Image (cartoon, rainbow, N blue to C red):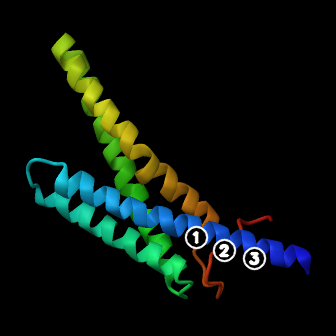
Amino acid sequence: MADDERAAKNQRRFAVGFGVTDLLSAVLLYVGVFEGLPTRYWLVDLAAALTMTLFAGAGVGLLAKTHWGPWVARVASAVALALGLGLVSTLALTASYLSGIYGPVGRGGALILSLIAALALPYLVLLPAAQLVWLGPWRNTGETTGSAPAGS
């Protein structure tokens, strides 16, 4: 019985950790896109608003121990992972193009794009991937805080 209690305690810690991190990611997306970018582009704004809303919902759902929290966290993580991989790939390709075509001036632009990719990587690629691993397969298990990875 002690192992079950320890496992439940660990699951709750992960739920709280991911819930807080999801809320922090939502705030960082708001600041980075809606406060940091000087011009508006509807495609970027739409993707950021969707991801920000999903992260906020996932954070609230995990922290409040709701039955829908893990499902929203899965959707938020999948969307963020797809958008994050697209963003980081686009930034890497653009940085390499700038560096190769424009020489020293392009290297400066490539450095800025590389820094943006490095800042986006933890919140839009690594965190969603880790959260998807923690949540486990996309099946209805009836649990409210996620399931242990397969094989454990």
Q: Amino acid at mark 3?
A: Ala
Name the side, left or right, on which 81 lies relative to 137.
left
The residue where tag 1 is placed is: 16
The residue where tag 2 is placed is: 12
Q: Badge 2: how crowded within 10 Å, few (<14), some, or many (20+)?
A: some
The residue where tag 3 is placed is: 8
- Mark 3 and mark 2 in contact? Answer it, CB < 8 Å: yes
Q: Residue, x 48% and y 72% (percent of image)? A: 73
Q: Residue 77, how many percent across, how many down?
A: 46, 64
Q: Secondary structure at mark 3?
A: helix
Q: Amino acid at mark 1?
A: Val
Which badge, 1 or 3, comes first in the chain's sequence?
3
Q: Secondary structure at mark 2?
A: helix
Q: Residue 39, how many percent across, how many down?
A: 8, 50
Q: Amino acid at mark 2?
A: Arg
Query: Which residue is at the far left?
Result: 39
